[in-house]
Image (spheres, rainbow, N blue to C red):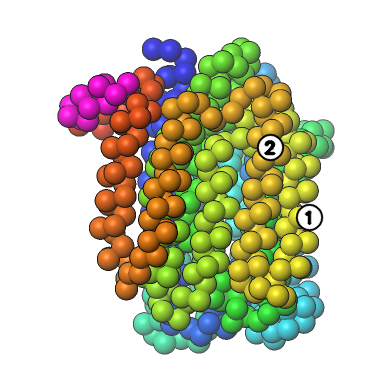
Amino acid sequence: MSEVNHALQRIARGTGIVFAGTVISMFFGFLSRTLIARYFSVGEYGVYNLAITILSVALVIVTLGFPSSLPREIAVYREKEPSKVKTLISTALTTVALTSAVWTIVLVLGAEDLARIFSDERLVYAVEVTALALPFSALTGVIISITQGFGRVREKVYFQNIVYPVFWLVFVLLIVALDLHFSTIFWAYVLAQSITFFLLFFEVIRTEIFGIGPYLNRNIGKELIKFSVPLMLTGIAGFVMTWMDTLMLGYYKSSEIVGLYSAATPLARLLPIFLNSAAFLYPSIISRLYAHEKLTEMKRAYQVLTKWIFLLTLPLFSIMMLFPAATIAFFFGPNYISASQALQILALGFMFHTFLGLNGLSLVVIGESRFIMVSSILSSILNLMLNALLIPVYGMSGAATATAVSYIAGNVLVSIKLYRETKIHPFSRNYVKPLTISFLLLGLIQSLHLEVPNVWHAIPILVMFITLYGFLVLLSKSVDREDVELLLAIEKRLGIDLGAIKKILRKFV
């Protein structure tokens, strides 16, 4: 087996597990969101989203970039200085515990000021309560990143993707069933986060995955923070890219508009689900190829993986682009249909990131984290400027446009840098052909201006589109040998017989 196939199969196995957990998490998350959106008013749903957004900003700051840096740092320490791994872990956990405690106090004391910024007094109580979840959420994220450094996905899937979403959904259902006041939703959020943390903490102690002690090593802490700060700044810039549209809509418009827009954003963020699933194990596996200067193999793995991610994401993108109103109405109800155009625009931005592949993580692998920081900051500045220009005039569509354009610009910068440093790009001949076919088919269907009353009427059209698309991809001979070998590995892993599919694919390789 070639190194490319070996790397792809390892990534595929990890991707499958993480994807399954992510689907479960998103499913329960969507149920919780739709219950909140349908049971409470649009304005209250907007307040909820503003409070969670503010908490997300604080979370990026208090974790200091550790969730991105610890997997790499732990792997390095395990190879070079295994005796210091326990100290590294304890230093990271202690540091985040201290920073999260400080920022919890800051948020509680500053809740009234934040409410004045967004001109909504309901935000005071919401921020004061949700701030209490910050230490639990921060430490949960750091512990999971530590287990990732040990090559484990179990803790992420079980606790972050299943335990928390299930508890959160149960609490939301109880609030709805018991007809409790809107303010109860924030206490339920804190309770769900704290339960998840304690269950994860005790599981780590029980299984002895890694040791924890009351250590705070100054030198190790300095090294970790020095490496992590650019990633923290990247995370802050990424947050700006993700949430600034929501915050600025709240500032320029109202909580009601935020509520409407918050129906489009979670749907559009579904699109990178396969990309993010593949990203979990990608750095550790591809780093081995780079360490041995095997750029040709690294490039090939990148291209095949990107093509698979695009093909898997295409059905989701198609239904959002072709039938946005039906998609939003299905999840959030007819009151949110006015966010349809925003969904289409956001879908374009997220899909652009998807079809370029894991370009940012590839730069991390080759040691270009500072460039990622710079490009992220530039993109976030562009996002801020466009939001300020477009939201007052175009509202939700302006916010969506600002986000989409910023995502596209940032990904172009990162992809250009990656190509200049390594000559790596996703556009193999057998990737360009499916891209072209998909664009032409989507454009053709879009030009027909099909109207469907609900998502169930859209599904037959989508099935016909995917069937025709698959036939044209096969006809254009866009199947690589690595595709077939990856399929064989999946078949073996699942213990199923894909004989008919294999025969068809082999004819078109």
Disc 1 marks a residue whose amino acid type is Ile
Secondary structure, mark 2, is helix
Secondary structure, mark 1, is helix
- Residue 204 counted in the magenta span: no
Front one among 287 and 59: 287
Q: Which residue is mark 1?
A: 381
Instruction: Assign the magenta stretch its main secondary structure.
Output: helix
Q: Position of residue 28 (x, y in %)?
A: 40, 62
Q: Earlier in the sequence, mark 2 or mark 1?
A: 1
The segment highlighted magenta reads 497-509
Q: Which residue is mark 2?
A: 414
Dividing the picture into quadrants, the one containing residue 168 is bottom left
Is residue 60 left or right of 322 when viewed as pictured? right
Q: Is residue 431 above or below residue 32?
A: above
Pick the quarter of the image with the N terminus: top left
Q: Position of residue 141 (x, y in %)?
A: 59, 49
Q: Can you see residue 171?
A: no
Front one among 405 and 378: 405
